Amino acid sequence: MGKKKLSYFDNHGMPGNRREFLASGMMSFAAYMMTPSILGILAKSSVAQAADGCDSSGGPTLPAFVSVNLAGGASLSGNYIVHDMGGNLLPKYDILGLGTTPPTETEFGNVLFPSSTAVTQSFLTGMRAQANGALAKSSFIGICVPLQDDTSNNAIDPTGMVTAAGLVGSLLPKLGTSGTTGTGIRQKPSNTVPPTPLVVSKLTDLTTALAPASALTTNLTQAQQKNVLQLVSDLSGSQARAVASVNSSSGQTLSKLVQCATGKNIDLATQTNPGIDPQLDSDKTVANLWQMTTGGTLFGRSQTERQIFGSMVYNALKGNSGSVGIDLGGYDYHGQGATAQNQKDFDAGQAVGKILATAQAMNQKVCINITSDGSVGAPSGSGLRPGFTGDRGSGGMAYMIFFDPAGRPSMKNDKTAPWQLGYYTSGQGAADDSIVGSADKAGVAMFANYLAFAKQESLFSKVLTPLSTTDHDAIVRFG
């Protein structure tokens, strides 16, 4: 694959319309460049960053994109039955923790997983426990890719490309739970750097993101807050118009964006329920699904986590936010024994199952990207789920799951294992010479399949050099 690494400006020059400003990350610049001393103090930049202009037209609608990263090196290759280059089973799976000939069953139509009867706590059984039947309307891709262990340096995150293709929120920016890499999860970006995410560590990080700064809310009434923000809007608009030359379409677009962004702040400052907290919905569907008001640990998540994750997914599915990144910690679990490891895999599956159930309840499409940093290995000659004893990045893996409320997305049937990208060798390691043989190549494949799922494959060339016909056929699994 090895395509030239392109930035947004390399491919397009200066953005010239509302959606291109948003995708390039210039929305925050437009929102407070004109009056930094005022806007930097009085208004939240995250609102201005995400405000999608004065209207919602001008680009394709893309499905929600949610990344789930299992930080530490989870055994994704031990929770799915990997195949070789010809689409056949391997001679044995002992180092992957599945014994010589693992018992199997199918999900997502015909994808092979370790038997839920033999392995009662696994990623598969966790998904099934929480998905509320959504797996029947979902497709799966397993990506065989060697990865570095215990590091955030794997350049596998595709959300920069996803954003550049046009997935932006109407109220909130890209969301994440980690601020260490700029992607929202502890994985580096593949090919294209995304806009800086809003890092969510508690539910109020979302709710206060749409409010004026605390000095306004503490000292001024709501009417006074609106008046101050109106002043900011007027100042921003007048200064932006001074910058925009008569013959500059990009300058005029920038002027419009500034006025729209500050106008959005005014609207939101006067709303008691801007629609980002599912607990305020009249039917409480999503809040009840994630059991947000119940204390304690449920389906492997604390109440705080349930509130954060449920709200982030809710906003992604509503189109309020851009892509969402969720880090789940504790997956550096080699040496902890099979019982603890199986429980963690089960909990990861439950989290993904709950995201699928939420998409089903909200009747929205979603693409879920599941990654980890490296993997783990069991001793040679081990039986089924003996417990992993060490890091083993050569056994790296990533998953993609695609849900469509209208029914399971159809995939190509021109390969023995059409649901798998890349392959494993007889040594039970992911091949590094495949089309997804490195983290950045895997990220591009994720992006290409996301666009194919969205039926927007033409957007690929907006972000990266177009794929050759050979590479496209090798990477894209929908058809």
Image (cartoon, grey):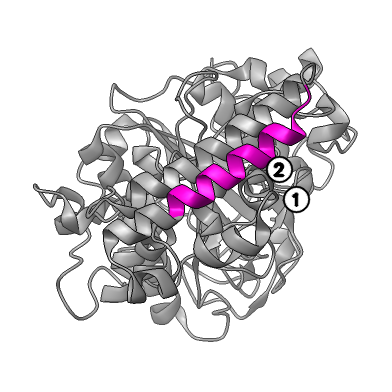
Q: Residue at x 29, y 66 (%)?
A: 307
Read off the magenta span: 229-245
Q: Nearer the viewer, residue 165 or 406?
A: 165
Which residue is more in the foreground, 102 or 48? 48
Q: Quadrant of the C terminus?
A: top right
| 397 relative to 292 in the view: left or right | right
Report if residue 21 lies within the magenta region: no
Percent across and percent down for residue 419 are 54, 32
Q: Is 15 located above or below residue 22 in the figure?
A: above
Image mark for residue 196: none
Q: Is residue 292 above or below residue 256?
A: below
Cα separation between marks 1 and 2: 5 Å
Q: Residue at x 45, y 68 (%)?
A: 213
- Label 2 sits on what residue type? Ala
The quadrant where residue 237 appears = top right
User: Are discs 1 and 2 less than 8 Å apart at CB?
Assistant: yes
Residue located at (45% from left, 72% from top): 201
Q: Secondary structure at mark 2?
A: helix
Tell me if residue 238 is in the magenta stretch: yes
Is 398 above or below relative to 139? below
In the foreground, 348 or 29: 29
Instruction: List the residue tagged with mark 1.
Output: 439
Count neighbours of disc 2 (C-alpha within 10 A) and say few if under 14, some if 14 to 19, many if 20 or more. Answer: many
Measuring from the top left, give residue 346's x and y in whole percent.
Answer: 36, 65
Which mark is on residue 442? 2
User: Residue 147 occupies which quadrant of the picture?
Assistant: bottom right
Q: Position of residue 361 (x, y in %)?
A: 21, 40
Q: Amino acid at mark 1?
A: Ala
Residue 57 is at least partly visible in this image: yes
> Considering the numbered disc 1 on the image, is that residue within a helix, a strand or a loop?
helix
